[in-house]
Image (cartoon, rainbow, N blue to C red):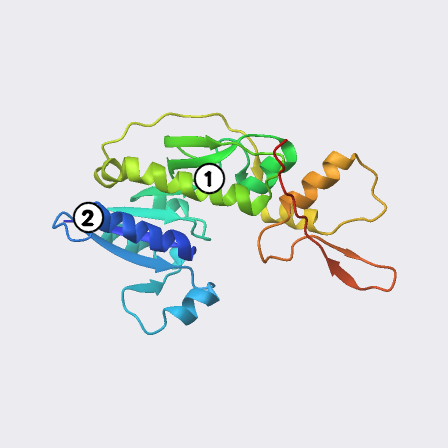
Amino acid sequence: MKKILLLTDNEELLTRFKSLIREKGLSESSSYEFEYCFSPQNKVFIEKYRTVKWIRPLNVKNEVDFLSETYDLIISLHCKQIFPAALVNKVRCINIHPGLNPHNRGWYPQVFSILNGLPAGATIHEIDEDLDHGPVICQKEVKVESWDTSITVYNKVLDVELDLLNQKIIAILNGTYKTFTVGEGNLNLKKDFNSLCKLNLDEKDTFRNHINRLRALTHGDYSNAFFIDEEGNKVHLKIQLDRTNN
């Protein structure tokens, strides 16, 4: 029996992954045993799952030996932890990444695709020592429309990720897939995103770029974009875009 660990910090993807496993008949298969973990800093999961045993918090960096000795495969599905080199060199690790590698690797790929016009999409790849990097198993682009915001692009990417998993899950579990390499592309870190959030009211740019920045920072209930007014108040803002068919 192969032991599979899924690490995720995304509630919707956790639910959809478990549904996929059930639909494929894998949850009851004698060939695979699935276990689930999340990041210790995930306060929402800590509270929600504190009384259950089927999922638990796990610090990847502190459990390298245990993980490499226990599991045949580790899957990162929007896990907010960086896998150490010692781990990825000992056990096969797969990442389901909400970006079209090699474009906008790192934090919030859809945000930067809106800003820099590079392709958005989903990529399933083997994890190596670099961030969102390694041989690609499969990927698919999603179109970024002029009326999209970060959340609408992200939701499209989630659907594509699950479609790709549906197609490739058996091959991923058994290691029977083929991979291909892509270029190095570009990498965005969390500090790059944070620097976008504070708006300078005197900044001069095209209206197109101002709109793109606001829609890139509009993500559901999150308060990302803000400015400081003359009295020192921090004011958050979002943008609403509605397509009209002519």
Q: What separation in Å lies between label 1 and label 2 (alpha carbons)?
A: 27 Å
The amino acid type, in three-letter code, at marker 2 is Leu
Q: In this figure, which residue is indicated by the disc labeled 2? A: 26
The amino acid type, in three-letter code, at marker 1 is Asp
Whether residue 135 can be seen here: no
Does residue 163 sit above or below 81 in this rendering?
Answer: above
| Residue at the left extreme of this rendering | 30
Number of marks present in the image shown: 2
Callout 1: 10 Å neighbours few (<14), some, many (20+)? many
Quadrant occupied by the C terminus? top right
x, y percent for residue 62: 38, 59
x, y percent for residue 89: 34, 41
Which residue is at 80% across, 64% downward?
233
| Residue at the bottom extreme of this rendering | 51
Q: In this figure, which residue is indicated by the disc labeled 1? A: 132
First in sequence: mark 1 vs mark 2: 2
Callout 2: 10 Å neighbours few (<14), some, many (20+)? some
x, y percent for residue 11: 41, 57
Which residue is at 31% across, 63% downward?
55
Residue 140 is drawn in which quadrant?
A: top left
x, y percent for residue 75: 33, 47
